[in-house]
Image (tube, rainbow, N blue to C red):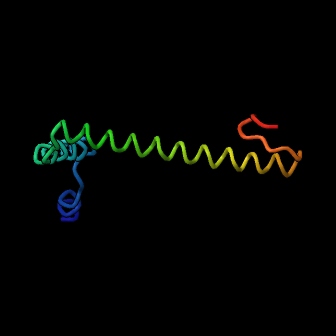
C-alpha cells in the first residue's frame, strides 16, 4: 500500500519535464504577436540614437571631471589631455 502512494506522488523524469517545458515555450511563442519589421527598425534606430546621446554626455562629463581633477592636482586644466 505504501509503494502505491509513493509511485503516485513521484514527479516525472527530469528529461520529460524539460521536454514538456520546451514544448510549452514553443507553443507560447506561436501565440505571440510579433511587430512588423519596419517597427523593429524604427525602435532600434531610436535606441541607438539615445545610446549615442548618452555616450556623448557621459564622455563630456568624464572629461570635465578629469580636467577639474588635473587642475586641483597639477594646477593646469587639461580636457582629454589637451590643455595649457
Q: Residue at x 39, y 40 (%)?
A: 48
**Relative image position of residue 45 (x, y in whole percent):** 32, 39
Q: Quadrant of the N terminus?
A: bottom left
Does residue 49 appear left or right of residue 37 in this picture?
right
Q: Residue at x 89, y 45 (%)?
A: 74
Residue 1, compared with residue 54, is above or below; it is below
Does residue 1 appear left or right of residue 70 in this picture?
left
**Relative image position of residue 13 (x, y in whole percent):** 24, 46
**Relative image position of residue 56 (x, y in whole percent):** 54, 43
Q: Which of 31 and 46 lies nearest the eye of the viewer?
A: 46
Query: What residue occupies the far right of the structure in this picture?
Result: 74
* Total numbered labels placed on residues in the image: 0
Q: Quadrant of the C terminus?
A: top right
**Relative image position of residue 69 (x, y in whole percent):** 79, 50
Does residue 50 appear left or right of residue 23 in this picture?
right
Query: What residue occupies the far left of the structure in this picture?
Result: 31
Q: Residue at x 83, y 48 (%)?
A: 71
Q: Residue at x 55, y 47 (%)?
A: 57
Residue 36, compared with residue 7, is above or below; it is above
Does residue 6 appear left or right of residue 69 in this picture?
left
Q: For residue 46, which quarter of the picture? A: top left
Amino acid at each position: 500500500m505504501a509503494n502505491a502512494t509513493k509511485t503516485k506522488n513521484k514527479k516525472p523524469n527530469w528529461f520529460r519535464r524539460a521536454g514538456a517545458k520546451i514544448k510549452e515555450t514553443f507553443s507560447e511563442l506561436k501565440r505571440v504577436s510579433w511587430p512588423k519589421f519596419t517597427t523593429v527598425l524604427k525602435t532600434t534606430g531610436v535606441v541607438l540614437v539615445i545610446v549615442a546621446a548618452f555616450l556623448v554626455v557621459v564622455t563630456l562629463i568624464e572629461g570635465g571631471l578629469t580636467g577639474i581633477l588635473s587642475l586641483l592636482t597639477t594646477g593646469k586644466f587639461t580636457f582629454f589631455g589637451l590643455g595649457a
